[in-house]
Amino acid sequence: MTPNSSEAGAPPLRRSTMLLYGLGSASNGIKNRSIATFLLIFYGQVIGLPSTWIGSALAITLVIDGLLDPVIGQVSDNFRSRWGRRHPFMYAAAIPYAIVFAMLWMPPVGWSPEATLGYMITCIVVLRFVDTFFEVPASAMAAELTTDYHQRTLLVAYRYFFTFAGGLLLLWAAYTFFLDEKSGGLFIRSSYGAYGIVAAVVIATSILICAIGTHSRIPTLRQPPARKATPKVVLREVIETLSNRSLWTVNAAGLFVAVATGLVGGLSTYFQVYFWHLTPKQLSYLPIIGIVAALLGILIGPQITRRLGKRRGAIVIFGALALASTLPVSLRLMGVLPPNGSPDLFPILIAEALAVGALTLMGSMAITSMIVDVAEDSELKTGRRSEGLLVSVDNILKKTTAGVGVFAASLVLAAAGLSDRISPDQVSDANMAKMGLAYVPAIWVIYVGAILSLLTIRLDEAKHEDNLRILREKRSGSGS
């Protein structure tokens, strides 16, 4: 596989292009943040489905969706067109993505619980399928836009910033304009439908901006050779690519992070509304804090990985993240924090949101950047560029394990007595203690698992530079 133009002759990657490329990930942030924050409470407390139904359905749909990712990854790796390998899929995803997202928040009125569950499952499966059409090719493009070890970290940082900022900005809009006290708060059905339409428009716009903003780079991206590949050849190539040891050592850490993300996301609204008794006005401030946290993450994260390396930097980050994620809940369980409603409590929760948001972005950024670096390691071993297939593995593992996290969240809610329609003032302190006592050790176990996995990774900057050198020598020797 050779580039349309030589790597040396490709124009420098401008900061504006990096920004436009990163902006496309806002679509994924809006989708994930909306589902993690609102789906359990919308379909559970507003529509009336049991939380265990919803959690189980999410876990199942994530597994189904994950099976499609490597197919899209392999197809986009070998797709030939005048718009390159990635852009046709990105353009095709924008409008269907927006339509299905809006439909998710407007289930038919009067349907039975079973039919409503089927509607929800169908929407989520289709939504994640069209998301894959954009997310896998767009993620794969990071390895093609630059081979520089540290510039890749910055490129990934832009993606994660807009993932966080996009999701949080729409979350702020939801609490401020759609789910505020004047509109009836979190328990008015029609408010979610209005939010879904607005968010859908933003999703389609962000995807199109990313595709158009990187369109000029198509001549510098790699083009697969023209060939006729039999199913047997394709299967052999997939197995060769997925046999890369570095791919699995990096993804092992990502597995634990995805479980933590699903667990925290599934419980976040319940902690905020039922555990801390935050008002809609206070909830509207948290997304803004999250955007500030994302800015801190994009500024500090690359500096940490540059100084410590991606692996050691991620170890430090995940240790700090486990502490920040559990400290306020632990202190409440010990009776140390001020009571709910106290003016001294909310600043503490703001500090927690700031620390957790920044550290989560930095940790995810380090893991994804290491996965991008596997592209050259894989090319050296197989002779093919397989960025799409490599990132699809990351997507599969994130989706399936995040589903495990959401399912675990639904079990925590059931154990705490929140599986049926219930208002915050009906929940006892004992119920909240059960939720906290299950949450704190689970988070620590998950992040310790991530740290142990990181200790096995051997793909560092020196190894990456060595891979690039060998590949340049091979290309020079073959005349390409």
Image (cartoon, rainbow, N blue to C red):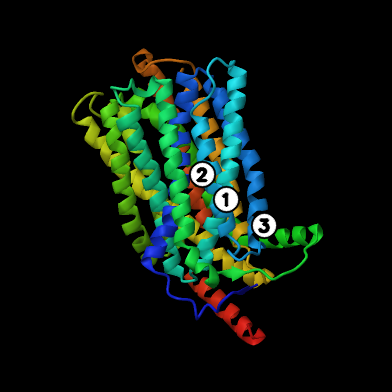
Q: Residues within 10 Å of mark 2 (few under 14, many from 20)?
A: many
The answer to which quarter of the image holds residue 437 is top left
Tag 1, which secondary structure?
Answer: helix
* Type of the residue with mark 2: Ala
Residue at 52% x, 77% y: name it.
Answer: 7
Residue 50 rendering spot, x and y as whole percentages: 54, 19
- Tag 3 secondary structure: helix
Tag 3: amino acid? Val
Q: Is residue 247 visible?
A: yes
Position in image of residue 78 (x %, y %): 67, 63
Of the two numbered discs 2 and 3 on the same chain, state the one appearing first in sequence. 3
| Residues at discs 1 and 3 in contact (Cβ within 8 Å) | no
What is the C-alpha distance between the residues marked 2 and 3? 25 Å
Front-lying residue, 470 or 383: 383
The numbered dot on residue 75 is 3
Near mark 1 (Cα within 10 A), the count class, few <14, some 14-19 or many ≥20, is some
Residue 150: where, in percent of width, then height? 42, 68
Q: Quadrant of residue 181?
A: top left
Circle nearer the N terminus (1, 2): 1
As drawn, is 294 to the left or to the right of 367?
A: left
**Marking on residue 258:** 2
The amino acid beneath tag 1 is: Ala
Give yes or no for contact between labels 1 and 2 (Cβ–Cβ under 8 Å): no
Figure quadrant of the C terminus: bottom right
- Residue position marked by numbered label 1 in the rendering: 92
